[in-house]
Amino acid sequence: MIQTEKTPNPNSIKFISERVISNSGTEEFHSKNLNKIKNPFVRELLSFKGVELILLSKNFLTVKKDDHVTWDSLKPTVISHMNDYFNKNKSPVWDKSVTDTKKYDGEENEIVSKINEVLDTKIRPAVARDGGDIKFRSYEDGVVKVELQGSCSGCPSSLMTLKQGVQNLLKHYVKEVQSVEAI
């Protein structure tokens, strides 16, 4: 059974499943990269008219659409696609044994560890409730750079979330943090 939930971004909807969608953390896919995507479920979903990106997570996926299609026409198609997949497959949609969730090449020091802990325990669960994710990308000279994904990507309230939520929490728990920027 698939349930839907609105997100703060009017162009994104969260599709919640009782089945595991991703057993490898969150992964975001953009329609502009369709030719590079090997996963058949993801390729087909991104090829639906109006779908710009999808975010796969453990028990939900978020679909972000463009303005040329309505949710009345797209939502039943996505639900049907998910139900069809789960009726034919026992495995998750995204089943990858090793996933690089941080994509961070810098030195893993005490400050970076604290930042990741706050992101994992305080921020990521809240962002996931809205159908999105936040990925740590770098820390240098007091500035944390993160990537907003899923419904948070391009959301009208994402700047407020970033500055009033993420930045304030990180500054509170990690004294070395001075600001947070989205990339």
Image (cartoon, grey):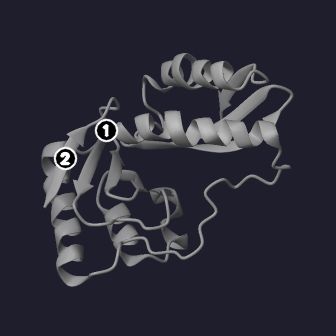
Instruction: Identify the image quadrant of the C terminus.
Output: top right
Q: Is residue 84 above or below residue 136?
A: below
Q: Is residue 161 above or below residue 107?
A: above
- Residue 142 in percent (x, y) is at 81, 25
Task: Tell me: 173 left or right of 91.
Answer: right
Q: Answer with the quarter of the image where residue 176 lies.
A: top right
Q: Is residue 181 visible?
A: yes
- Say which residue appears at 49% left-offset and 77% top-offset: 38
- Say which residue appears at 35% left-offset and 38% top-offset: 129
* Secondary element at image label 1: loop
Q: Answer with the quarter of the image where residue 148 lies.
A: top right
**Distance CA(mark 2)–CA(mark 1):** 19 Å
Under mark 2, the amino acid is Thr
Q: Residue beneath label 1, please?
A: 67
- Residue 107 in percent (x, y) is at 86, 49
Q: Depth check: give the residue in front, 68 or 37.
A: 37
- Say which residue appears at 64% left-offset and 19% top-offset: 172
* Dot 2 alpha-carbon crowd within 10 angstroms: few under 14, some 14 to 19, many 20 or more: some
Q: Is residue 150 visible?
A: no
Q: Residue beneath label 2, please?
A: 4
Task: Tell me: 45 left or right of 52.
Answer: left
Q: Nearer the viewer, mark 2 or mark 1?
A: 2
- Residue 157 in percent (x, y) is at 43, 22
